[in-house]
Image (spheres, helix red, strand yellow):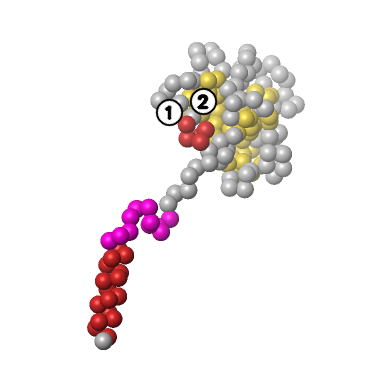
Amino acid sequence: MRSFLLAGLLVTLAMAACSSSDEDETEPRPKPVPNQLQQEKIAFSRRPALGDDTELYVMNPDGTQVKRLTNDGPREAEDLAPAWSPDGRMIAFVSTRTRLPDVPTVGAPRAEEIYVMSADGTDQRRLTRNTNLDLAPEWLPDGRIGFVSCAVPENEPPDCEFAAIGLDSSR
């Protein structure tokens, strides 16, 4: 009787294994990315022509439909390091469009600050306001933007640390 039950159990398991399909698998699958814009567009920085400022653009992965997102004009500014938000609605980036505080405007070094904008280039706003070099923005799971912030004292090596800021400029 015992071998009959064991044989029946093995037949049942074999039938279940044969009838399973890919659709019935219980293994975890990657979750769909809610950020379809990020998947369909590439954000990048580029200098359109010699002597121009570096601006941010988006394009299709095949290189078509290039659209300029930033245009700082003749301000000798650089917009760099775009990073998509997880939902694809915003882009964080570094910009040198502001001058360091308390420095004369002619020939003054530029502050490298963290900015954010809508994915279409609208609503550009500055998040950081300091004399540090704020670099390499990346979106954190909690919605803040993480970045490297480096104090650069004169005649000393830079002192860098990881920092994070919220969209409301809170740390």
For label 1, the crowd category at 10 Å Cα-Cα, with few meaning under 14, some 14 to 19 and many 20 or more, is few
Three-letter amino acid code at the position of disc 1? Pro
Residue located beneath label 2 in the image: 58
Residue 148 rendering spot, x and y as whole percentages: 58, 40
The answer for how far apart the CA atoms under marks 2 and 1 are is: 9 Å
Please state the extent of the stretch shown in magenta in the rendering.
18-28
Q: Quadrant of residue 145?
A: top right
Q: Which label is found at residue 75?
A: none
Three-letter amino acid code at the position of disc 2? Val
Residue 53 visible, this angle: yes
Residue 68 rendering spot, x and y as whole percentages: 55, 20
Q: Residue at (24%, 83%) from the top-left corner?
A: 3
Residue 37 rendering spot, x and y as whole percentages: 52, 33
For label 2, the crowd category at 10 Å Cα-Cα, with few meaning under 14, some 14 to 19 and many 20 or more, is many
Decide whether residue 82 is among the magenta residues. no
Q: Residue at (53%, 41%) from the top-left corner?
A: 34
Q: Quadrant of residue 105?
A: top right
Vertical side of 63 occupied by 51: above or below: above
Residue located beneath label 1 in the image: 61
Q: Residue at (51%, 18%) from the top-left corner?
A: 47
Residue extending farthest to the bottom is 1
Residue extending farthest to the right is 102
Question: Considering the numbered disc 2 on the image, is that residue within a helix, a strand or a loop?
Answer: strand
Answer with left or right where residue 113 lies relative to residue 65: right
Q: Quadrant of residue 93?
A: top right
